[in-house]
């Protein structure tokens, strides 16, 4: 995996960690600063639009949840976090006649056809954020939030996608096969419990633990075609393993093809049965490809 992939994943993980610290740390209500957004409006938000260089991120509320760029399911938890951050944005000093660099633009639209439209920017060392509207800039901040407010607007569209790939467990999985070189195995449910390659498992609790890896199984990050050409180069090559899971909650099986990692990096490219591309960390890949019976 290239340094750019690892860097982007690290940014998202750091952002998530700082969000957790922010929401778990409370706030000081001794001084009530003016809010940039109306809390009442944000309760009725229907669409976000962020434009940054060549990337456009449009997140819309529909009857099927939040949809990203009209194509993908968005990560609902991440969208709710965005709303919570915006609810807390406070306005600082005003700068008239803004003539400095602009990073991008944003719109936040509401059910009753009103919207906030603004551009955003940061200072040179990215310690301050500014929202600019009609040439007037306002410095904004979120008390207790360690990241730059603008960071959440400049994420790649892939980073807003729902990362849930498989949702099975030992209570719902009926059959699991791992097809890989020299070490295939098959787990099947047989009336009351599971067999591994037709045999009673030597350690039933270890088998349950293995199957439960697939409960709320999420990708580290979704990856669209063309974003990382070196990953695109893996297509047309032979995957190192294919996982197929039949689950009572689904008619079609879950399928996941896993490709060799490049240059022994810590991530693998994987593709699901719908052609969605993603990266998975090497540790998880090793665990799910390891034979769950210690006799093997």
Image (spheres, grey):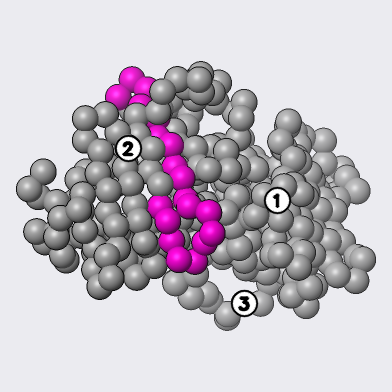
Q: Mark 2 Cα within 10 Å, few/some/many (few <14, many 20+)?
A: some
Instruction: Locate the C terminus and report the quarter of the image it occupies.
Output: top left
Label placed on residue 179: 2
Q: Position of residue 295 (x, y in %)?
A: 7, 48
Pointer 2 with pointer 3, Cβ within 8 A: no
Cα–Cα gap, marks 2 and 1 = 33 Å
Cα–Cα gap, marks 2 and 3 = 61 Å
Q: Earlier in the sequence, mark 1 or mark 3?
A: 3
Residue at the image position 35 percent from the left and 41 percent from the top: 281
Q: Position of residue 199 (x, y in %)?
A: 15, 55
In this rendering, the label closer to the viewer, 2 or 1: 2
Cα–Cα gap, marks 1 and 3 = 37 Å
Label placed on residue 68: 1
Q: Position of residue 152 (x, y in %)?
A: 61, 50
Give the image quarter of residue 51. top right
Badge 2 marks a residue whose secondary structure is strand
Pointer 1 with pointer 3, Cβ within 8 A: no
Label placed on residue 117: none
Highlighted range, magenta: 245-264
128 left or right, relative to 1: right
Label 3 sits on residue:
31
Residue at the image position 76 percent from the left and 68 percent from the top: 63
54 left or right, relative to 115: left
């Amino acid at each position: 995996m290239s340094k750019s992939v690892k860097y982007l994943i690290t940014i998202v993980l750091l952002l998530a960690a700082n969000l957790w610290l922010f929401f778990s740390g409370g706030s000081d209500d001794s001084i009530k600063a003016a809010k940039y957004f109306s809390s009442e409006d944000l309760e009725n938000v229907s669409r976000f639009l962020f434009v940054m260089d060549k990337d456009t991120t449009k997140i819309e509320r529909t009857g099927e949840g939040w949809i990203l760029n009209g194509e993908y399911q968005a990560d609902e938890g991440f969208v709710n976090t965005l709303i919570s951050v915006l609810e807390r944005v406070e306005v600082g000093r005003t700068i008239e006649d803004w003539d400095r660099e602009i990073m991008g633009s944003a719109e936040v639209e509401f059910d009753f056809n009103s919207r906030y439209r603004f551009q955003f920017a940061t200072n040179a060392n990215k310690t301050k954020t500014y929202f600019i509207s009609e040439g007037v800039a306002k410095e904004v901040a979120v008390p207790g939030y360690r990241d730059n407010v603008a960071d959440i607007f400049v994420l790649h569209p892939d980073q807003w996608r729902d990362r849930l790939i498989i949702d099975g467990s030992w209570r719902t999985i009926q059959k699991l096969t791992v097809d890989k070189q020299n070490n295939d195995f098959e787990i099947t449910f047989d009336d009351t419990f599971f067999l591994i390659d037709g045999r009673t498992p030597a350690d039933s609790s270890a088998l349950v633990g293995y199957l439960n890896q697939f409960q709320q199984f999420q990708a580290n990050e979704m990856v669209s075609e063309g974003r990382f050409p070196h990953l695109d180069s893996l297509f047309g090559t032979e995957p190192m393993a294919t996982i197929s899971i039949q689950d009572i909650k689904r008619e079609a099986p879950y399928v996941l093809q896993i490709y060799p990692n490049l240059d022994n990096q810590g991530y693998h490219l994987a593709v699901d049965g719908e052609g969605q591309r993603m990266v998975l960390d090497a540790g998880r890949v090793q665990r799910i490809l390891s034979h769950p019976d210690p006799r093997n």
